[in-house]
Amino acid sequence: MIDSDIPIVKVGTPVVEVQTMLSHKANTFHNINYIYVVEKNNILKGIISIKSILSCSNINLKVDNLMEHNLITVNPTTDRERVVYMALSHGIKNMPVVDDENHLMGIISYDNIMRIFNHELESDIFNFGGIFHRVGDEYTSIKSSAWIMIKSRLPWLIIGIIGGTVAASVISTFESLLSKLLVLAAFIPVMVYMSDAAGTQSEALIIRGIALDPKLPIKSYFLRELKVAAVIAVASGIFVYIISIIGWGNPVLSGIIGLSMFFSIIAAVAVATLSPLLFKKIKLDPAVATGPLATILSDIITLAIYFSVALLFFDIFNI
């Protein structure tokens, strides 16, 4: 991944020497988009584009006067997604790799950056679909064996069945409640969908944030997400309250739905935000482990909130 066959010159080298070096050794380098300027002990000080070197008319000029000092670099432990993000967001063709003391180790070439990008994109697509996999031709090709595809897809489906069974048991617990106001059952899909949708949005953002910024301020990020969730929950609760009043004309039903929607969305966002952080802490890939598990947990919590609020309203209004 790290390519060390790159043109490197010392600080203070005249342009003419760099031009001569390139004319004699160009074929020995894997990548010559940039010249890398180092000082003693191979400490990276700057880079110069090949265009700048070849177009420089003052051949006695020192490379120090041409090089770019404000460098974007990564180290060998930088997350792959962050490497891609930094390269694309700053328009960098080749990403210099340095150690903690800024010693130049090599570069990650544009081809490798794009390869990582494609790998991570495939990985995220599969993960959000609940598929265990290793990204590769054997998993993405139409020629993949049936057994490989079964092993990659079945585990989360089994977990989904278990989660669905737990959700069904929650509903059956409140069977007598449903018999008093059957229309409550009609709104279960709405409640579950809204909490899942809000949770998925938060989940995508936190997973991206973790990948791109290892020092993500967790506390402030979580509080911000709760503020956003509260506003979304209030707006959604009011909207569904109005819709249900217009459609069914039952204030108790509308109150149950509106209040449940509010608490369910906040709970779903909290679960979706905290789950990736927990998985990261125990050294599991948040993108792989979070999706289906967070959805199942969110569904169960949503149903528990919905029926608990309904039970509270029934007690208050003696239904």
Image (tube, grey):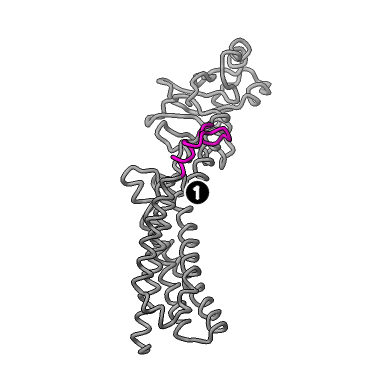
| Relative vertical location of residue 75 with respect to residue 283 in this rendering, above or below | above
Going by the numbered disc 1, the residue's amino acid type is Gly
**What is the x, y in percent for residue 297?**
38, 59
Q: Quadrant of the C terminus?
A: bottom left
Crowding near the residue tagged with mark 1, few <14, some 14–19, many ≥20 C-alpha atoms within 10 Å: some
Magenta stretch: includes residue 205? no
Please tell me in which quadrant of the rendered image residue 168 appears.
bottom left
Q: Is residue 81 left or right of residue 77?
A: right
Question: Which residue occupies the extreme left position in the image?
Answer: 282
Report the front residue among 168 and 131: 168
Q: How many marks?
A: 1
Magenta stretch: includes residue 152? yes
Report the front residue among 112 and 160: 160
**What is the x, y in percent for residue 285?**
39, 43
**What is the x, y in percent for residue 49?**
61, 27
* Residue stretch in magenta: 136-153
> Which residue is found at the position 55% from the left and 28% from the top?
109
> Which residue is found at the position 48% from the left and 79% from the top?
183
Secondary structure under badge 1?
loop
Magenta span main SS: helix
Do we see residue 71 in this rendering? Answer: no
Q: Which residue is mark 1?
A: 129
| Relative vertical location of residue 174 with respect to residue 270 in this rendering, above or below | below
Question: Which residue occupies the extreme bottom position in the image?
Answer: 318
**What is the x, y in percent for residue 197?**
50, 61
Question: Which residue occupies the extreme top position in the image?
Answer: 24
